[in-house]
Amino acid sequence: MLLLVGLGNPGREYASHRHNVGFMAIDELARRAKADAFREKFSGEYAKGELLEEPLILLKPMTYMNESGRSVQAAMTFFKVPPKDVIVLHDELDLPFGDVRLKMGGGHAGHNGLRAIMAVAGPDFGRLRVGIGRPPPGFRGEIADYVLSSFDAVERATLPDVLKTAGDTVLDVIRRGFDAAMNARNTRPKLKKPKDPAPPA
């Protein structure tokens, strides 16, 4: 059983923000997994589903980012899920918008949701990092202002494809295992070197 945790902030005013892309990805997975309706528990909302005959628990903590660990710990304890079977889907400033990458363990890079989960579960859980990029030149405000702002029109047009990629990546984890999926998904295709021109006859 996998526990898939999407990070975000509750409330309609946050729903479209970059910081809530984890919630968006969980909703995409719930649709694919034909999950039952989300219900309130574990200081959050959770649903059960299945992909490729793998049972899934889908969780959206409703505690705000810096208290996400409380919700995750409660769900892990109730379902007896070890950290290695937890995948946290979250926004990632250090990836360009649209990039989706897997990572096992590591630090929190200032992400308050990850920081809160690490405080209760340690660092050794899976992360599915959905790139939102850094603020563009000329952006007025702090990093917090950027992540708590909505995707722009160009990004919104591409967002369904990004969420599809996130869902495909989770399917890959189920199909091949985390390490194999990480190696396959995180490897950028090598550009072919142009052939040397044929020598003159």
Image (spheres, helix red, strand yellow):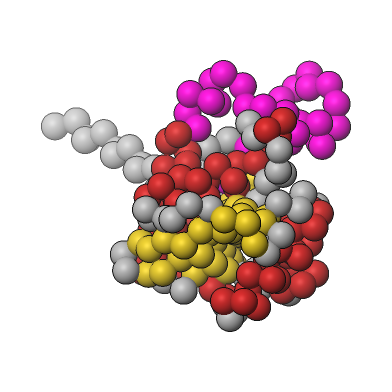
Residue plotted at (80% across, 58% down):
67
Q: Establish if 61 lies above or below 181.
A: above
Q: Does 28 sit above or below residue 135?
A: below
Q: Quadrant of the C terminus?
A: top left
Residues 181 and 199: in front is 181
Nearest the viewer among 80 and 111 is 80
**138 in the magenta segment:** yes
**Percent x, y for residue 24?**
55, 42
The answer to which of 5 and 63 lies nearer the viewer is 63
The residue under the point 71% across, 51% down is 62
Judge by depth and name the residue closer to the eye, 8 or 194: 8
Residue 92 visible (yes or no): no
Q: Is residue 175 above or below residue 185?
A: below
In the picture, measured across the screen, residue 21 lies left or right of residue 178, that is right
Q: At which x and y percent is residue 54?
A: 37, 69
The span picked out in magenta is 130-159
The x and y percentages for residue 105 are: 65, 69
x then y, percent, for residue 196: 29, 38
Instruction: Write down the quadrant of residue 123 in the picture.
Output: bottom right
Badge count: 0
At a point 60% along the width and 47% down the height, the residue shown is 22
Q: Is residue 62 magenta?
A: no
Extreme-left residue of the structure: 201
Observer able to see residue 61: yes
Give above or below for 172 relative to 152: below
Write the residue at 59% across / 46% down. 23
